[in-house]
Image (cartoon, rainbow, N blue to C red):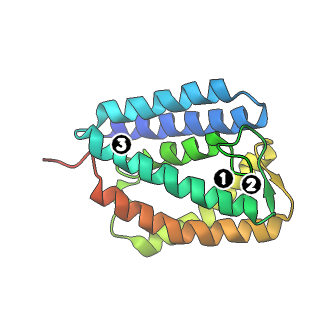
Amino acid sequence: MKPAPLLINVAAYQCAWFACVVGTARQLPAFALVVALAALLLHLSQAKAPRREAALLGIAALVGALFESVLVASGWVRVPGAALLDGSVPFLMVVLWSVFATTLNVSLRSLRHRYVLCAVLAAVGAPMAYYAGSRMGAIQWVEMLPALALISIGWAVLMPLLMRSAQRFDGFARP
C-alpha cells in the first residue's frame, strides 16, 4: 500500500481515538461522534468494496460492545458517558471499536496471517491505550491491575479474530 493512504488511515484513527476519549471524559459525545463518523466515512469512501468493509466495521462494533460490557460488568472499570443500554458501556466506546477496525485492512494489513504477533501486540498495546484513556478521564479504575489483565487477555484473544474477520471482509483487496 502507498504511504499516503497509510498516513491518512493512521491520522484519521488517532484523531477519532482522541475525540472519543475526550468526548467520553468531558461529556461531549456529539463532538466525538462527528469526528469518529468523519473517520469512518473517509475510510469507507476509500474502500474498493465499501459494503464489505462496512460489514467489518459492524462486526468490530458488536465485538467491542460485548467486550466492553464484560469489562464493565467485571466491576473493575467504570466508564462515564451515555450508555447504549442501561448498565452497558457508552456508545462512544463501541464507535471506537469500529474506528479501530478501519486500521485492520490498511495500516495493520502487514499483520495478516501473523496471529501470534497480533495477539502479543494487542496484549501489550491495548492496556496501554486504556491506561492513556484513564489518564485523560475516559475510564475509571475500580481495580486497575485485574482490569488491565482482563484487557490484555481479552485483546490477545480478540485481535487475531478481528484480523481474520478483516481478511474475510476486506474492502481494500485488489479485485
Distance of mark 1 from mark 3, alpha carbons?
Answer: 24 Å
The residue lying furthest to the front in this view is: 86
**Which label's residue is closer to the chain start, 2 or 3?**
3
Is 110 displayed left or right of 48 in the figure?
Answer: right
Q: Quadrant of the N terminus?
A: top left
Location of residue 13 in the rendering, given as x and y in whole percent from the top left corner = 51, 39
Q: Which residue is mark 1?
A: 129
Please tell me whether mark 2 sits on a helix, a strand or a loop: helix
Which of the 4 quarters of the picture holds residue 154? bottom right
Q: Considering only order in the chain, which callout, 3 or 1, is on the residue closer to the N terminus?
A: 3
**Relative horizontal placement of residue 107, taking residue 155 as reference (left or right):** left
For the question of whether residue 119 can be seen, the reply is yes
> In this figure, which residue is indicated by the disc labeled 3?
54
Q: Is residue 34 above or below residue 90?
A: above
Q: Amino acid at mark 1?
A: Ala
Q: Residue furthest bottom?
A: 116
Q: Residue at x 35, y 50 (%)?
A: 105
